[in-house]
Image (tube, rainbow, N blue to C red):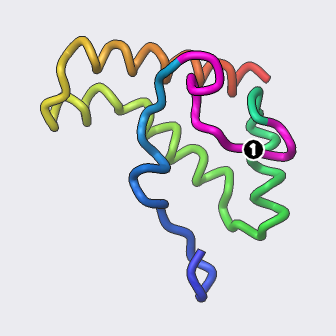
Amino acid sequence: MDSSGEWRLTPAYDVTFAVGRNYTARHQMRIRDKVAGFTRGDLLQVAQEFSIRDAAEILERAEDAVGSWPRYAARTGVAADSIKAVGRSLATRGAELASI
């Protein structure tokens, strides 16, 4: 957040795709004292605690962007097998978030 209260995307290393095993299978972050199993409610609660305006809209925009992964990836020359693998993982994570 900048001094005027506006939020913007963090550097790319914070939003790149994570793949690995065990604790490196996902990015290492903590939300509301959880390291996994985050819910939409958790994200909205953090947004409220930090006075983030329009949090639900921001989440919807992020979901739309993630849903457009195959189109964006293809436009930038990502290999088809990588597009599919990342897409499957993103769908799994999205289903986890939506189901809780």
> From what the image shows, is residue 7 above or below residue 33?
below
Does 51 sit above or below residue 14? below
Q: How many marks?
A: 1
Q: Can you tell which quarter of the image residue 2 is in? A: bottom right
Rendering quarter of residue 11: bottom left
**Residue farthest to the bottom, as pictured:** 3
Q: Quadrant of the N terminus?
A: bottom right
Q: Position of residue 10 (x, y in %)?
A: 48, 60
* Start-end of magenta stretch: 21-34
Q: Secondary structure at mark 1?
A: loop
Where 45 falls versus 67 (above or below)?
A: below
Q: Looking at the rendering, in which quadrant would you find the C terminus? A: top right
Residue occupying the point 74% across, 19% down: 99
The spot of residue 19 in percent (x, y) is 47, 23
Q: Give the residue at mark 1.
A: 30
Three-letter amino acid code of the residue under disc 1: Arg
64 above or below 37? Answer: below
33 drawn magenta: yes
Q: Residue at x 40, y 19 (%)?
A: 87
- Which residue is at a point 50% across and 47% down the rendered structure image? 61
- Say which quarter of the image contains residue 54: bottom right
Image location of residue 82, percent across then percent down: 28, 18
Q: Residue at horizontal 60%, vertical 87%?
A: 3
Position of 17 with respect to 59 (left or right) is: left
Label the magenta part by its dominant secondary structure.
Answer: loop
Q: Is residue 57 magenta?
A: no
Residue closer to the observer: 69 or 16: 16
| Residue 49 coordinates in the image, percent (x, y) | 84, 63
Q: Residues within 10 Å of mark 1 (few under 14, many from 20)?
A: few
